[in-house]
Amino acid sequence: MSTLQEALDRIEASAEGSGIGAFFDYDGTLIDGFSAGAYFMDRLQRRDMARREILDVIRMARKGDLSEAEFGEVIGKGVLEWVGRSESEMRALWRRLFSERIGTTLFPETWKLVRAHQRKGHTVVIASSATPYQIEPLAEEYGIEHIVCTQPKVREGRLTGGIEGKPPWGSGKAQAVAKFAAAHGISLEQSFGYANGNEDIPFLQSLGKPAAVQPKPILSELATKENWPILTFERRNRGPAKSMARTVGAYAAMGTTFLAGLGYARATGNNRRAVDFVTAVSSEAALAVLGVEVHVVGEEHLWAHRPCVFIINHQSKFDMFLMMYLVRRGFSGVAKKEAANVPGFGTFMKMAEMAFLDRSNTTRAIDALKPAVDLLKRGLSIVMAPEGTRSWTPRVGKFKKGAFHMAMQAGVPVVPVVIRNAGEIMGRNDQTMRSGRIEVVVLPAISVRGWRAKDIDARVEDVRQMFVDTLEQWPEGAA
C-alpha cells in the first residue's frame, strides 16, 4: 500500500518533458464509480428504459468482469441506443450528467496526481473504454488535452450506431496506448499508468511505472506481487456514515447557536453583537464536531485592514463555515435577493445585514452593488467569492469584477484568502462534510486606490494569478 504523498514524490523525482506519458483510466480511477451508471440512473428516473434493457443492465452488473468479446457487445448496444443523435446533443447530455451526478464523484487525490504530472510537463492522457462525450467534461475541467477512448462512428455530425475499430478494453487499451505513444514520441518504459480494473492489467503491464488505484481483487494481488504502488482513497459517491452523523451534528450545533443568538437579539435589540456571537461560536462548534483542523498562515492580515473586502477561491458550501471561523466578527456578505426568503437561514442573513443584490436589475451593474458599498462605509467587512460559483476542482476560475468595484467605491482594500483542501472536506454539490485538514494562506491587503476603470481587467487578473501561484507554490511552513 502506498500513500498519495509517495506517489507525488515519485512523479517529482521523474524526468521532465512531454516524452513521458501519464495515462489515467477514467471510470473508477479519476471518478468514484462508473459514468455509465449516472446515464442509466438518469434514464430510470425519467422512465426512459424498457424492462428488457433494465434486465440486461442488471445481468451485466452481476456478472462483474467481462471478456473483451462481452464488453464489445455491451458497448455496441450502448452506442446503438444513440443512433441518429447529433454530437452536439451527446455533448449536451453528458455535460448535464457531469454537472448533476458525475462531478461529485471526482477523486481529489487523482486531481493532485494529474496536476503533478502537468507541472513536470508530462503528456497527460485519459485512456478509457468510455466514449469522448462521457470524458470531455472532466478533461476540460482538469486541463487534459488528450483522450484515448471508444470512438462512435459519426456521419454528417450524427452517430450511426457503430464504433471505429476496437474499443480500448483489455488488450485493446494496451494497443491503443502504444499506438498513441508511438505517434507522440512517448517512451512507454518511462511512462506512468493509473487504473483500477482487472481488465486494465495488460495496459498497466505495458508501462514502466504502473500504479493500481482503488484496485479490484485480481489487480490488487498482481500489484502486490509486482511491487506496484497501490493507492486507495475515501469513497466520493457516498459519504461515510460517520461523516453523515458529524454533518448532522454540525448543523445542529449551528442551529442551537443561532437560536441562542436570536434570543439575545430580541432581548437586547443588539443584532450585530448577536450575529458576531453566532458566527464565532457556531463555526467553532461546527468544525469541532466535524473533526476539521484549520491551519492558517498570514492570520494577521485578517485583522490589519478592516473594513475590507475578503475574497476567496470558492469550491464548496463549506467555505461559509470556514470564513465564519476565520473572520469571526464585524463582517457580512452578499447574496441574491431571493435568498432572503429561505426559511431560517434567510432570517439570519437579514440579522447579519447581508447585502441582497437584485440580479434582474441589469441597467447599471455598479448601482446594484450599492447595498454592499454602504455596509463597507459603515465599517463592516464583506466576504465574496469573485469566481461567482463553486468549482469542481481547486483550479481557480475567472474572476468577476464586482468585489473590486465595491472596494473601489468604498475606498477599502481587498484581502485575498487562499483556501486549500476545501473540496476534500465537502465537494461542490456534496451534502455531507468530512473530517480533515484545511489550509489557508491570507495574503497582504491590496490597495485599490488609484485603480482606473480602463485598467481593472488587468488588475483583477493579476489578483487571480496570486491565487493560482499560491496554490501551485504553497508557502513553506504552510503545509
Image: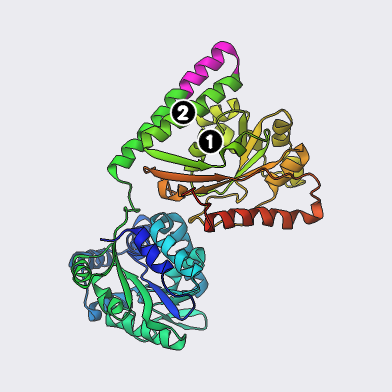
**177 in magenta:** no
x and y, in percent, of residue 48 in the image: 36, 62
Question: Magenta: predominant secondary structure element?
Answer: helix
Q: Which residue is mark 2?
A: 282
| Vertical relation: 281 (above or below) 423 | above
Q: Is residue 211 above or below residue 238?
A: below
Q: Residues within 10 Å of mark 2 (few under 14, many from 20)?
A: many
**Amino acid type of disc 1?**
Leu
Give the residue drawn at x 41%, y 69%.
13
Q: Please report the residue visible at 37 percent of the width from the left and 85 percent of the height from the top.
A: 178
| CB within 8 Å, label 1 to label 2 | no
- In the image, the segment drawn in magenta is 258-270
Q: Which residue is mark 1?
A: 326
Q: Residue at x 42, y 32 (%)?
A: 286
Amino acid bearing label 2: Ser
Q: Tell me which corner region of the image, top left, top right, bottom left or bottom right, holds residue 360.
A: top right
Foreground: disc 1 or disc 2: 1
Mark 1 falls on what kind of element? helix
Between 76 and 30, the one lying in front of the other is 30
Number of marks: 2
